[in-house]
Image (spheres, helix red, strand yellow):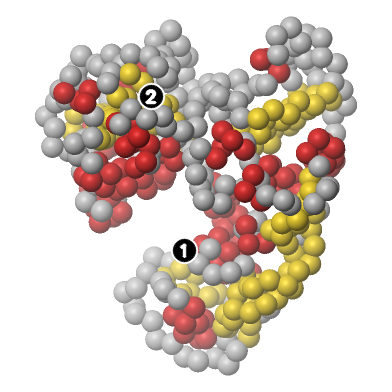
């Protein structure tokens, strides 16, 4: 079946690529039952269990292993994607690590998932599933999945997201060593001001910068009226400086639309590693993430407010971000002579409506350098299947008079500059 991918889909894919999917309508939560890090884990008296090789759980015996409680939903793409990784980790460290997946959904729904999902079948996923759950959700309340709990020696050691479940963290925890994971708390207020005793009612306006805040869920920019102070509040929590500035420049409408890939960033700073988590290290966030709140008497349009906030970053951090033309290595789509190509009729293919859509998709896939469209044909429908390299892609593109060439091209990049660089 063909899929018509529009430009809107490409950008929505980027927007939601790392987003958690919300499973249920929000319900009243009894936080008196909720466990926190360091609390003693009390096992359920019974569970509804399917799949895997376990008929039941010996919770006493499991105290010698790091136990992962992995909350998932059938319509959560990230939840499904990480299952093979979790199974591989368990298989590799079977004497140290145990995975238990948990869902509120019923048995029939889960059976249908594993019967029809080609990705799970291809990876032969057979983890134990606790279904129709209410017990685990009551002691580990959350709004979004995946939601990950690490338990060892009968204690809760981590309440985190899927990025925190790494081989290093599992082995360190089993060895009694400290682990570094971000806390996932879907019900946290996410508010720096509330931690400043006595100032909630007296603040008139102002800006608050802080480092990483334990227990506050990461959140990108939000502009809204604050119900406590009555002021207009701009905020972001536990995010990287580069991520923060990149969103601001989009809100300020200071540049043309393109995929915000890190290759399109030019650094004029002493140490770029404090701005961006290049190695995707979980511990990086506690060291480098920031929280920001600004309270204004006057409400401004988001585009203007973004400029005001960017000035705060210049004033307090001595850093600014702006757009500039630079020559960098790119994948350039150019016209070429048409060369017929006969595709495998049974191969899966995707149709891109316009070379601009193809360019956006190529940028999103990150298989090649940043893409530039010199064909600019918005009506052509390009249908291509899988490819492993540029040559394989070009053989298919030539049927439409298009080819990709990797070469230097002058394009817009984002410049991150420190005042005293």
Kindly indicate whether the residue at mark 1 contacts the one at mark 2 (C-beta within 8 angstroms): no
Residue extending farthest right: 298
Q: Is residue 128 left or right of residue 70?
A: left
Q: Which residue lies at the image location 54% right of the left edge and 91% below the top edge?
A: 338
Q: Which mark is residue 3?
A: 1
Badge 2 density bin: few <14, some 14–19, many ≥20, Cα 10 Å: many
Quarter of the image where one finds residue 179: top left
When asked about the image quadrant of residue 103, the answer is top left
Q: Say left or right for 222 vs 294.
A: left
Q: Nearer the viewer, mark 2 or mark 1?
A: 2
Mark 2 vs mark 1, CA separation in Å: 44 Å
Q: Position of residue 330 (x, y in %)?
A: 63, 73
Give the SS element for disc 2: strand
Residue 364 screen position, x and y as percent: 55, 60
- Mark 1: few, some, or many residues within 10 Å (few <14, many ≥20)? few
Task: Let me know if residue 323 appears in the view.
Answer: yes
- One can see residue 24 in this view: no
Q: Nearer the viewer, residue 291 or 4?
A: 291
| On-image quarter of the N terminus | bottom left
Q: Which residue is mark 2?
A: 157
Above/below status of 324 relative to 44: below
Counting from the top left corner in percent of width and height, residue 79 is at 38, 41
Which secondary structure, mark 1? loop
Question: Which residue: 70% across, 13% down?
Answer: 196
Query: At 63% from the left edge and 62% from the top edge, which residue is drawn?
Result: 263
Side of 182 where 380 appears, left or right: right
Viewer-closest of 113 and 135: 135
Residue 279 placed where, x, y %?
A: 52, 50
Q: Earlier in the sequence, mark 2 or mark 1?
A: 1
Between 312 and 64, the one nearer to me in the picture: 64
Q: Is residue 403 left or right of residue 205?
A: left
Give the total number of marks visible in the rendering: 2
């Amino acid at each position: 079946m063909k899929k018509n991918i529009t430009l809107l889909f490409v950008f929505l894919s980027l927007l939601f690529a790392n987003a958690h999917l919300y499973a249920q309508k929000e319900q009243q939560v009894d936080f008196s039952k909720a466990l926190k890090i360091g609390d003693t884990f009390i096992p359920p008296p019974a569970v509804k269990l399917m799949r895997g090789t376990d008929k039941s759980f010996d919770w006493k015996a499991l105290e010698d292993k790091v136990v992962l409680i992995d909350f998932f939903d059938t319509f959560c793409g990230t939840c499904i994607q990480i299952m093979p990784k979790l199974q591989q980790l368990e298989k590799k460290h079977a004497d140290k690590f145990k995975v238990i997946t948990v869902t509120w959904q019923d048995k029939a729904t889960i059976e249908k998932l594993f019967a029809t999902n080609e990705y799970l079948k291809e990876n032969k996923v057979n983890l134990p599933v606790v279904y129709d759950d209410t017990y685990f959700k009551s002691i580990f309340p959350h709004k979004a999945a995946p939601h990950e709990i690490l338990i060892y020696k009968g204690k809760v050691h981590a309440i985190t997201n899927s990025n925190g479940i790494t081989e290093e963290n599992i082995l360190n925890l089993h060895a009694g060593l400290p682990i570094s994971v971000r806390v996932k708390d879907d019900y946290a207020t996410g508010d720096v001001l509330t931690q400043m005793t006595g100032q909630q009612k007296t603040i008139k306006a102002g800006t608050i910068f802080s480092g990483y805040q334990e227990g506050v869920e990461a959140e990108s920019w939000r502009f809204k009226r604050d119900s406590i102070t009555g002021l207009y509040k701009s905020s972001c929590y536990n995010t990287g400086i580069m991520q923060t500035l990149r969103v601001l420049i989009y809100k300020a409408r200071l540049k043309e639309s393109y995929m915000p890939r890190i290759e399109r960033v030019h650094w004029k700073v002493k140490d770029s590693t404090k701005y961006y988590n290049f190695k995707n290290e979980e511990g990086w966030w506690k060291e480098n993430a920031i929280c920001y709140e600004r309270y204004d008497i006057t409400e401004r349009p988001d585009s203007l407010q973004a400029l005001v906030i960017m000035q705060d970053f210049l004033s307090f951090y001595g850093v600014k971000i702006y757009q500039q033309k630079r020559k960098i290595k790119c994948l350039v789509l150019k016209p070429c002579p048409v060369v017929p190509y006969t595709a495998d009729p049974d191969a899966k293919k995707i149709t891109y409506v316009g070379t601009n859509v193809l360019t956006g998709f190529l940028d999103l896939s990150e298989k090649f350098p940043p893409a530039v469209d010199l064909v600019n044909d918005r009506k052509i429908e390009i249908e291509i299947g899988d490819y492993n390299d540029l040559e394989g892609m070009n053989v298919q593109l030539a049927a439409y008079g298009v080819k990709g060439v990797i070469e230097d091209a002058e394009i817009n990049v984002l410049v991150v500059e420190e005042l005293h660089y």
